[in-house]
Image (cartoon, rainbow, N blue to C red):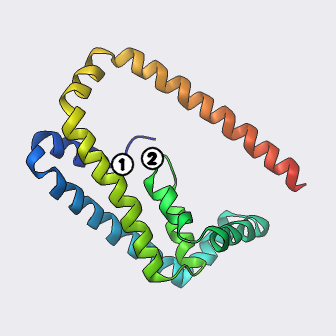
Amino acid sequence: SLPELNDVLLMTFSISHPEDAWKFAVLTILGSVIGCALLYAVGRKGGEAFLKRRFTNERLVRIQNWYRRYGVLAVIIPSLLPPPTPFKIFVLSAGTFGISWPKFLTAVVIGRGIRYLSEAILAVVYGPAAIEFVHDNYGKIGLILAIVIAACGIVFVYARRRMRSMEA
């Protein structure tokens, strides 16, 4: 998966206008929080039906137990991770499984705050040099990304088969 549009825009604007990078980060955080709040509300109203169509009952119980065990960390950790992490599923699940609104909001602000402020800082510090590096090494970077994606796919398939055999 490619980076989300908000990541690309944040980094591009931060490189173009480094003095305003923090403003771009704050606006990106705000936009993400608003989007997450809407999806959380959907989860509260009817997320269970969606999740039941997508996951087995055993898997839903495991996800729910995960929220009970880890609480807001179940939202903070995936909110920090870059794409292709399926963050929207975690947001919807948080609403469905009853993570309280204040805890959810705090978790999203912390996670997205760390992520987007870090991206803005890195874009300002390394942006122009990073763009030049990518331009000069485009073929090598593409090959490395392809290898990493293939390796992740192999690990995912292996882990999924192993989990299924353990469930059986």
Disc 2 target residue: 83
Query: How far, Cα to Cα, is label 1 from label 2?
Result: 7 Å
Left or right of residue 159: residue 103: left
Q: Secondary structure at mark 1?
A: loop
Disc 1 to disc 2: CB gap under 8 Å: yes
- Give me the disc on residue 4: 1
48, above or below 144, in the image: below
Rendering coords of residue 132 (x, y %):
22, 21
> Label 1: how many residues lie within 10 Å, few (<14), some (14-19) or many (20+)?
few
Q: Secondary structure at mark 2?
A: loop
**Which sits earlier in the primary sequence, circle 1 or circle 2?**
1
Q: Residue 47 sits in which quadrant? A: bottom right
> Label 2: how many residues lie within 10 Å, few (<14), some (14-19) or many (20+)?
some
Rendering coords of residue 113 (x, y %):
33, 60
Residue in the picture at 82% in, 50% down: 164
- Give me the disc on residue 128: none
Camera-side residue of 53 and 148: 148
Residue type, mark 1 in image = Glu
Left or right of residue 157: residue 146: left
